[in-house]
């Protein structure tokens, strides 16, 4: 019995070492050890001192929007711009464009149709997992994940509404983990009066971006213990 246990412990340690070695290696085939899906609350993108511009298709829904799917290393750093020979091509995602306009709207100024934002996300982050997800699969995976995790519903059904009110960071985290089953990372920014507010939600997904997992590492950053959920 003890013998079996010690073999098991050795195996676990060996596996952990292997993961570390693979993740630390720049040559690791997929160049990543985990992936974040990041969703942005448009109200908090827009009410800062910098403000925002609605896309040419009009004001987005009052819902979280996708920001991107970002492969990252387990030490918290991440690869970027991994393949300049594989730029974003609209033709690869033509069947997804109308859904992307709704679920992945650009808010950058000047107003655009989204192509610039999606190109940026593909070029900077998507190319770093291109061996697992081609352009079409990358965007489709993000859209599917957003559908799986209905963040706004998770929050509103816990009484947390985008009404400019303040809510405890822990109540926000709990509402999302209760609904999705995994703890999110919450990124805050400041509105034009300097209030800490709910800006982006990070959830971790497995390397092929099909299901949520516990985050191997959380990003750094600090929110106040009570944060604003701005209206949009
Ligand atoms: P990244 O370069 O992918 O790390 O993302 C950071 C950039 O994305 C910043 O310049 C943000 O202002 C921008 N960003 C975040 N959300 C949006 C959005 N909804 N529309 C356009 N740009 C955005
Ligand atoms: P702290 O209040 O920073 O000591 O964090 C308490 C716990 O909440 C720790 O487990 C942190 O990892 C976690 N935590 C802190 N800030 C955030 C955040 N913005 N989103 C998700 N978890 C957080």
Image (cartoon, rainbow, N blue to C red):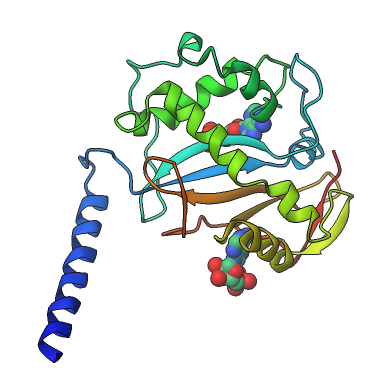
Q: Is residue 191 left or right of residue 176?
A: right
Q: Which residue is drawn at 36% across and 33% down?
A: 128
Name the residue nearer the viewer: 93 or 116: 93
**On the image, which quarter does residue 4 sit in?**
bottom left
Position in image of residue 46 (x %, y %): 78, 35
Q: Is residue 102 left or right of residue 218?
A: right
Q: Identify whether 152 is placed above or below 223.
A: above
- Which quarter holds ligand 1? top right
Q: Which residue is drawn at 86% across and 43% down?
A: 231
Q: Name the quadrant of the C terminus.
A: top right
Position in image of residue 218 (x %, y %): 49, 58
Q: Identify whether 8 is placed above or below 82.
A: below
Q: Please count the marks in the image.
A: 0
Q: Which residue lies furthest to the top in this view?
A: 91
Q: Which residue lies furthest to the bottom in this view?
A: 2
Q: Name the quadrant of the N terminus.
A: bottom left
Name the residue nearer the viewer: 30 or 205: 205
Whether residue 130 appears in this view of the structure is yes
Q: Which residue is drawn at 42% across and 22% down?
A: 135
Position in image of residue 61 (x %, y %): 79, 31
Q: Which residue lies furthest to the left in this view?
A: 3
Position in image of residue 119 (x %, y %): 51, 20
Whether residue 196 appears in this view of the structure is no
**On the image, which quarter does residue 192 sit in?**
top right
């Amino acid at each position: 019995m003890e013998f079996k246990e010690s073999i098991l412990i050795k195996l676990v340690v060996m596996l952990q070492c292997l993961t570390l070695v693979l993740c630390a290696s720049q040559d690791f085939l997929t160049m990543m050890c985990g992936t974040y899906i990041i969703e942005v609350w448009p109200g908090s993108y827009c009410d800062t001192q910098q403000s925002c511009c609605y896309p040419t298709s009009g004001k987005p829904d009052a819902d979280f929007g996708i920001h991107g799917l970002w492969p990252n290393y387990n030490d918290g750093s991440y690869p970027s711009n991994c393949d300049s020979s594989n730029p974003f091509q609209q033709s690869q995602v033509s069947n997804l464009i109308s859904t992307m306009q709704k679920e992945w709207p650009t808010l950058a100024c000047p107003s655009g149709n989204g192509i610039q934002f999606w190109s940026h996300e593909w070029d900077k982050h998507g190319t770093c997992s291109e061996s697992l997800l081609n352009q079409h699969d990358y965007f489709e995976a993000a859209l599917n994940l957003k559908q799986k995790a209905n963040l706004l519903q998770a929050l509103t059904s816990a009484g947390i509404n985008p009404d400019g009110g303040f809510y405890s960071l822990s109540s926000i985290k709990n509402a999302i983990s209760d609904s999705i089953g995994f703890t999110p990372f919450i990124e805050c920014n400041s509105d034009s009066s300097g209030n800490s507010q709910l800006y982006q939600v990070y959830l971790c997904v497995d390397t092929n971006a099909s299901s949520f997992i516990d985050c191997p590492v959380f990003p750094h950053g600090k929110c106040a213990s009570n944060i604003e959920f701005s209206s949009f």
